[in-house]
Amino acid sequence: MRGIGRQRRLRGPVILGMAAMVAIAVGGSLAATQASAAAKAPATARWHGGLSISKQYFGSTVEPYTGNETKVYRYTLSNAEGMSVKILTYGGILQEINVPSADGSEADVILGFKTLQDYVTYDSPPVTANGGPYFGELIGRYGNRIADGKFTLDQPGVGPVTYTVPINNNGNSLHGGLVGFGNHIWAAQEVSGNGYVGLQLTLVSPNGDQAAAAGTPGCPDGCTGYPAELKDVTTFTLNNSDQLGIHYKLTNESSNLNTVTNVTDHAYFNLAGEASPAGSAYGQLLQINADKYTPTNLTQIPLGYNVSVFGTPFNFTTPQPIGGRIDDVSAPDHAPAAYHQLLLAQGYDHNWVLNAQTPATTGPDGLNLAAHAWDPASGRELSVWTDQPGVQVYTSNFLTGTLVGISGHTYRQGAGYTFETQHFPNSPNQPNFPSTELKAGKTFTSTTIFAFSS
């Protein structure tokens, strides 16, 4: 076993950069009438010192903001080391991440769907219960949960104002509500710089996004929607050190309205490859740079405090098989007896509170280590670096074999796991948690890097 933050093959420092913002041509989807698949349209590629980016038509679907049928494209970022990343303008979705193993064989290490129609129908359908898995989506406006779909903000010159957003998960709002950022088509611009190639995606969320009348789905008493116009510019970058960067820049465009935001990426990783046998992720090793986690109530809303992971199945401070203790419901979890954590989540679906950064946990771009995972059989490793205070690790507990993946087989429990770098769930209603409020006219930036090696 290796210590936290170490890799078998050392990589060079990531080189990051951001191009100028692009004009928006907003897009998204609720219903799809796509041309069957992207393979019908030829890709065009551009090369930059061993790095390349190509663009391919992927179909079309209806953009919720405009109601218009809108084209969707798939971009492929590739490097000189054999790694490639496929990104959709629909939902900013990471569709594939192909990474070589120790013996050089490639595998797609994230779960996903083959067609646009599958993403529109199954990934995050606008339903009030039993929603989709959010495979690979850019999540917003608010990643994770907001209790009762309700929060209060102190607005300039007005005072406290209560806002309501659609409920879609056990009486709470999850991942932005019924029509989150993963349901929209983003404007795209290719970017490149010294040692990287990338894709910049832009989406503008209007003031009152997801407002709805009383009696509409998810809004029994009506929803105000999210306050303030919010511009999200998210840039994916890839370098020759096998580092995939996700750089978020969110600007509150309002001059007099504060808002809340919590963005993340919802890729499900399986370092053995997404086509691996059911439950294969359970045997992979995981280490999380966190001495505490956030226990929740029966609807997975944090209880408002953090507890120690030591002496519990949540202790990944040293490398452990992901599935080694996932069913140990007799073990203590340091939560009230009525809220047995592994039972209510059917596994891990929790926020780990990342330890304060030290020289030993500082990595590319000066980021803090969140987690390190590796697959002993293939030799593939993944280090997750971030500037966020928490990471939600979810072990695909609610995949039941009803969804067919990109390689033509079904996904079940243990098919993958997420590293949703984030602020904490329900932070707008927990004043003791790190704030997710974005003041009028202000900008929030954040970076997460997924660094692969073998």
Image (tube, rainbow, N blue to C red):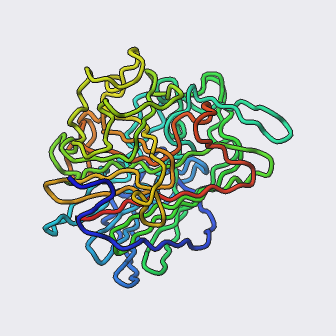
Nearer to the camera, 10 or 79? 10
Nearer to the camera, 58 or 382? 382
Q: Is residue 166 left or right of residue 224?
A: left
In the image, residue 317 sits, relative to residue 446, either above or below, namely: above
Taking the spot 28% from the left edge, 52% from the top edge, the residue there is 373
Q: Is residue 86 visible?
A: yes
Taking the spot 27% from the left edge, 23% from the top edge, the residue there is 331
Residue lying at the far top of the rendered structure: 338
In the image, residue 271 sits, relative to residue 165, either above or below, namely: below
In the image, residue 200 sits, relative to residue 441, either above or below, namely: below
Residue lying at the far front of the rendered structure: 359
Residue lying at the far right of the rendered structure: 157
Q: Is residue 42 visible?
A: no
Kindly indicate the quadrant of the structure image that contains residue 327. Answer: top left
**Picture mark count:** 0
Kindly indicate the quadrant of the structure image that contains residue 243. Answer: bottom left
Taking the spot 25% from the left edge, 32% from the top edge, the residue there is 326
Kindly indicate the quadrant of the structure image that contains residue 212. Answer: top right
Residue 347 in percent (x, y) is at 30, 31
Which quadrant is home to the C terminus? bottom left
Residue 345 in percent (x, y) is at 35, 28
Nearer to the camera, 193 or 108? 193
Taking the spot 51% from the left edge, 34% from the top edge, the residue there is 145
Q: Is residue 281 left or right of residue 352?
A: left
Residue 303 in percent (x, y) is at 50, 25
Residue 401 in percent (x, y) is at 23, 36
